Amino acid sequence: MRFKTGDRVQMMWKRSKGFPKMRPVSGVVVAVGFNRGQKARMQVCLETGDHVIQDIEYDRDAWVAFKHIQGR
C-alpha cells in the first residue's frame, strides 16, 4: 500500500500480537522517508498528539496496521 504526506490513516492494533479489541486511532501521515538500503518508513501524527514511525511495507512483526480513511 502506498502512503504519502497528508494522507489520513487509521491505526489498528493487531489482535494476532495479543492485543485485545481496541478502538482504532485516526491520524495524518506527516513524513515519508526512503533511505538507500533501508525499508521505506512513514511518520504518523495521531489524533492523540502522539507520533508513530512505521515501515510502509507489510511487516509481520509490527504491532499495528495502517489503512487509508476514505471520504474525509
Image: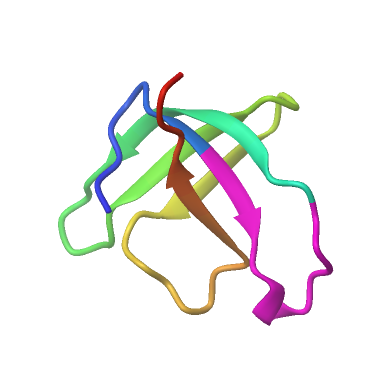
Considering every residue shown, the one lying at the far front of the view is 71
Q: Is residue 32 left or right of residue 35?
A: right
1 w.r.t. 28: above or below: below
Q: Nearer the viewer, residue 71 or 25?
A: 71
Q: Is residue 44 left or right of residue 12?
A: left
Q: Quadrant of residue 18?
A: bottom right
Q: Quadrant of residue 22?
A: bottom right
Residue 24, given in percent of the width and then of the height, sits at 69, 45
Question: What is the quadrant of the N terminus in the image?
Answer: bottom left
Q: Image point 26% across, 62% down: which residue?
A: 38
69 w.r.t. 55: above or below: above
Q: Magenta includes 52?
A: no
56 w.r.t. 24: above or below: below
Q: Is residue 7 left or right of residue 11?
A: left
Q: Which residues are magenta?
A: 10-22
Residue 15, given in percent of the width and then of the height, sits at 70, 73
Considering every residue shown, the one lying at the far right of the view is 20
Q: Image point 30% across, 40% down: which residue?
A: 3
Q: Image point 22% across, 50% down: which residue?
A: 35
